[in-house]
Image (cartoon, rainbow, N blue to C red):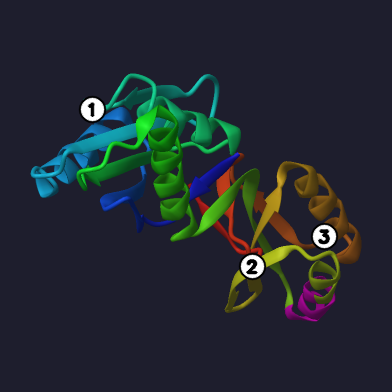
Amino acid sequence: MVVFEDKGVAEVVIRKSRFIGHLLPVTSVAQADAALSALREAHKTASHNCFAYTIGLDGTPVERFSDDGEPSGTAGRPMLELLRRRDIHNTLVVVTRYFGGTLLGASGLVHAYQDASQAAMEATTALTCVRMRKVRVSCDYATFGKLEYAYAQAEYLVGEKTFTEDVGMDLTVTEEEAERLSKMTADLSSGQARIEMDDVAWFGRRPDGSVVRL
């Protein structure tokens, strides 16, 4: 599954018609509706504000779309199909059209709306959805270097470190890695390190490998 971290905006011009693609991360229908209303207000002189969205990471997502006056099946549904093909979730795509005076035909409209949607996607950062746990490891200073080296070798994501009476390390690992991490930590510390694990949750992995909780 894929989500997006930030808003994306891009414009394509086809036969003098302007198609402005807007991509917005959303997590609820209410949020999507509010964002859609704001864009319609900002582009109230446009010929059309067509949209599609899909919301939900677990189970069957909520999906909606609209051609907003364009011929049926030429705008909203092709935009939704693009989201489905790329397995995109929690995303609203709106394409605003300012008519340039030349009719594009059904096929031309489908391509135009999908192209504008794709351009908006390429204007922001896509995140790969992964089920992960936040893990807090506490150990003494003598064990810290050994664990830090082992975590780096295993390519675990180590975040914040704190140095007080003991050393604390925050890690983010997948469900599968959590058990291996726990065993590795216990073995290397002779059972002395303390491990606290949060519940499994959805995280988004950036292209550089870093993650953000969704």
Residue hosting label 1: 68
Q: CA distance from mark 3 to mark 2?
A: 26 Å
Give the structural element (helix, strand or loop) at label 3.
Answer: helix
Mark 2 or mark 3, which is nearer the start of the sequence? 3
Q: Residue at x 51, y 51 (%)?
A: 213
Examine the rendering and report whether any part of residue 55 can be seen.
no
Span shown in magenta: 141-148
Q: Residue at x 31, y 41 (%)?
A: 94
Quadrant hosting residue 194: bottom right
Q: CA distance from mark 3 to mark 1?
A: 57 Å
Q: In the displayed structure, does residue 42 sit left or right of residue 191?
A: left
Residue hosting label 2: 208
Secondary structure that dominates the magenta span: helix
Residue 101 rendering spot, x and y as whole percentages: 20, 44
- If the image is split into quadrants, where does the N terminus sit? top right
Residue 72 rendering spot, x and y as whole percentages: 33, 19
Residue type, mark 1 in image? Asp
Q: Residue at x 79, y 49 (%)?
A: 177
**Category of crowding for the residue at label 1, using alpha-carbon neighbours closer than 10 angstroms: few (below 14), some (14–19), many (at least 20):** some
Residue hosting label 3: 185
Residue type, mark 2 in image? Asp
Q: In the displayed structure, does residue 199 sit left or right of residue 63?
A: right
Circles 3 and 1 in contact, beta carbons < 8 Å: no
- Please state which of the two labelled residues, at mark 3 or mark 2, is closer to the viewer: 2
Q: Give whichever of 90, 148 is nearer the camera.
A: 90
Give the structural element (helix, strand or loop) at label 2.
Answer: loop
